[in-house]
Image (spheres, rainbow, N blue to C red):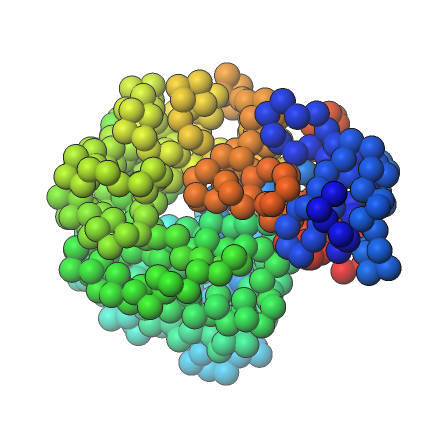
Amino acid sequence: MAVRGADTVVRAQAVHTLVAGQKPQRALAIVGDRIAALAEDPHGLDDLITERTTVVDQPGATVLPAFDDTHTHLILAGHSAHDVPVQQAHTIAEFLDLIRQRAATTPAGQWIRTTTNWQELNLAERRMPTAAELDQASDKHPILVKRGGHNDVVNTLALQLAGITDDTPTPPGGVIGRDEHGHLNGRLVDNAMGLVESLLPPPDRPTRVDGLRQASLDYAATGIGTVRDCMVPLPDLAVLQAAQREGALSVRVRALVSAIGMTDPAQVEDLLDGMQDWRYTADPLLRVWGVKFVLDGGLEAGATEEPYCDHGDFYGTLTWEPDALVRSIEAVVRRGWRVGTHAYGDRGVRTLLDAYQQVLERNPGLPANTLVMEHGGLADAQQRARAVALGIPVTVQQPLLHDTAEVEDGFWGPERVNRLFPAREWIDQGALVTGGSDFPVGAYGAMRSVWGMVTRQTVTGIRGPQHAITRTEALALHTVNAARLLGETDLRGTLTPGRLADLTLWSSDPTTCDTDQLRDLNPTHTLLGGQPVHAPGQ
C-alpha cells in the first residue's frame, strides 16, 4: 500500500461511501485533509496506524459524507447569535418584553434588531407586531424586526430616520405596509426593506466573527459541512474571510453575493466591479460562487398565475422587469460568475425560465449549472420539463415547507401548498435537484431535511405525500447532487480516496433507523478536511 501512515483511522459498523453499487465499508483512513483508503474489514487499515495516528473506534457507528445545505443563510444565522431572540416569545407582549430588555442595556439611538427565525403564527395573536407596538418597547432606539429574508417590521423612529412617510411612494417590487386608514404600520416587504436596512451600521468585526463562529458550529453539529449562503452582501465577504483566517468557520462556505433590492443592470455592473477582487481568492473553506437575484416575493408575495386566497386582485410581486433581469444576468455570466435566482410562485418560475432561456440563447456554451433556480416552489410539470430541457438545476427546501405550511395556507390555499417542492417529480423528470433549509425560514439540519423529504410532514400534517422521495435519494440531494451543483465532484460528495475527508458519524444508521428518529437525529462527530469540528466534549 502506498500510504505509509494515516493521521486518522475511523472504524465503524458501516461506511456508506455513496458510490453507486459499492457496499458499505468498515474502515476509513485519512492523510492530511484527504481520504486515503477504505476497507471492508474494520481492522483492514490497522497497518496505517502509527504513534501519531488518531483512532476513532466506533464499532456501532455509521459514517456518511458531511452534508451540504445548498440554500441557506449563514450570514443571518451569524447575526442572530447576538440579536434579540424573539423566537422564544409566545405572545406579542413577550415579544415586546424581549426587545424592552435589550433596550434597557443599549445606549439610546443605537439600533436594536431581532433574530429572523420566527413565525407570527407561533404567537398567540397570530400576527406580526406593528410600529406602534414596537414603540412601546422603545421609542428611543430604532428597532428592526426581521422575519425570514423578505419581511421587516420597524418602529416609528426607524421610519423617521429613513424618511418614510404616509406619502412615500412604494418602490418597484416592494411593499410599504399601511393600516386601514392608509397610515404606516411599520411593515416593509422585499424591495422596500432597503429603505431602512441601508441605515443600519454594521456590527464591529469581532462581533461578526464571533457570530459566524457560533452559527457555523451549530450547522456542523447537525451534520452540515458545506453551506451555500444565498444572500451575502458584498461587504460581508470580508467578514467571512476574517472568520476563515481566524479559524472561526466550522463549515465550508460557498457565497452568493446579494443583488437583492437592485432593479437595474447598471447597479449589477457596479456590484460585479466590487466582486472583481474576489475572483482569485478561492480557498477550500471559502469561495465566492456567484450572484443571487430575487425575482418574486416569498410566502406573502410569491408571483402566482392564480390570485391569492381572499385577495382576488393580488397575484404576488415580481421584483424585476423581465428585460432588465435578462441584461443583468447576462452581465454576471459574461464576467464568468454563476447565477442563482429566487423564483417561488408558478408565475415567478415561468418568468425566470423565460429569462434564462434568453440568456442561454444569446450566450451559447455557458458551463453546466451556470444558471440555477432557487426554490421553484410551485413549478408545474410543463415548467419542470422546460427547466430540465434548458439544463437548469433547482434547489428545494423541505424545512421551509414544514415550518410555514400554515402561513402559506392563508395566502395560497391548501391545494397549492400541497404542491410545493415536488421533489419526486423533479427527480423523475431528470432534473439536477439539491436540498437545503432556507434558514431562517426553515430550520437547518441534515437529517431534519431528509426526514421532511421522506415523510412530507409539516406543522399542519403530511402535505402532498405523492412528492415524497426515498432516503437514498434524499441523502444524494445533500451530498452527491450538491457536489455536482457546485462543480466539486472531484472534492466532495462521496467517501472515496483522494476526496476531502468531510464526513459524519452517527450513532444510528440514517439509512435504516426508524423514520420518526430521523427528524432530531444529529451526528456524534463531524469532520471537515479530517479535522473534528463537532465531537463529544467540544
Q: Is residue 318 left or right of residue 30?
A: left
Residue 164 locus on image (x, y percent): 25, 66
User: Which residue sits at x=62%, y=31%?
Assistant: 18
Q: Is residue 439 left or right of residue 65?
A: left
User: Which residue sits at x=31%, y=21%?
Assistant: 385
- Front-most of 168 and 4? 4
Q: Is residue 479 left or right of residue 178?
A: right
Extreme residue in the front direction: 2
Residue 355 locus on image (x, y percent): 20, 38
Residue 16 locus on image (x, y percent): 69, 32
The quadrant where residue 450 appears:
top right
Q: Is residue 450 above or below residue 83?
A: above
User: Which residue sits at x=39%, y=34%?
Assistant: 394
Q: Is residue 57 above or below residue 146?
A: above
User: Which quarter shows the C terminus?
Assistant: bottom right
- Front-most of 87 and 253? 253
- Front-most of 483 and 2? 2
Q: Is residue 102 above or below residue 352?
A: below
Residue 185 locus on image (x, y percent): 33, 57
- Front-most of 267 and 241? 241
